[in-house]
Image (cartoon, grey):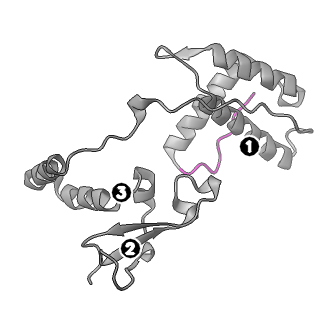
Amino acid sequence: MKVRTTQIETHKQQDALEHYFRNLCQILGAETDPNTLTAQDLYRYAAERRQETFRGRQITGQTIRKELQALKSGLKIAKRRGWVQGTIEDWPQPKKDPALRSQAGKLHAPEIVDAWLEELGRTPKADGARDQAELDALLGLRAAEIKRLQKTWLRKAPPGFPTPGIVTVPDWAAKNRHRGRPIVERPCRGILAA
């Protein structure tokens, strides 16, 4: 199975795809002709992958889903370009595992955050880092959402709102955009002039 990584937006995405295909090739075989893949091969892959561990933990259903999705997307592109003939209709749907408590976000007391921001402001090498960190803290957005932040998302809050401004994150920019969640409005202080 050859991987062609074209039109990939970031190195992080390319690294992830290469990692997924490394795992796929280990079980399905690096020399497997994509035209010979069957649904049975995919179910075998999911079952074998589920038995593997990483850092002492069983591979999660979420990881297997991502790997299979990468393969499915790759096969769709390959079919459009005439590199493969057929498609597989029946794909495994591994069950999601419960979230790990150790990976959950942690809340910090306001005085700890204030002390950290204060220290950032005193660090000469961190020029502008305090402003960025304060913006991140005020908005409460995920890191990926912060990276996509655009000025057009900022608007004045409606009258009577407890903050001067609102940041509206459109569906396409939110992490969970594939779930079609409604537009998220998050209050922010000091971002827009009243």
Q: Is residue 172 visible?
A: yes
In the displayed structure, would residue 49 be above or below residue 164? above
Q: Within the magenta stretch, is there residue 19?
A: no
Image quarter of residue 93? top right
Question: From mark 1 to mark 2, how far is it between C-alphas?
Answer: 36 Å
Residue named by callout 3:
140
* Image x and y of residue 29, in percent: 75, 18
Q: CA distance from mark 2 to mark 3?
A: 12 Å
- The quadrant in which the N terminus is found is top right
Q: Quadrant of the C terminus?
A: bottom left
Q: Say which residue label 2 marks.
A: 166
What amino acid does circle 1 point to? Answer: Ser
Q: Is residue 71 left or right of residue 56?
A: right
Residue span colored magenta: 1-9
Residue farthest to the right, as pictured: 85
Left or right of 19 in this view: 4: right
The residue carrying pointer 3 sits among few (fewer than 14), some (14 to 19) or many (20 or more) residues within 10 Å by Cα, namely some
Q: In the image, residue 135 lies at what x, y percent? A: 28, 62
x and y, in percent, of residue 172 in the image = 58, 62
Outermost residue, front direction?
160
Q: Which residue is mark 1?
A: 73
Q: Nearer the viewer, mark 1 or mark 3?
A: 3
Outermost left residue:
122
- The residue under the point 71% across, 33% down is 68
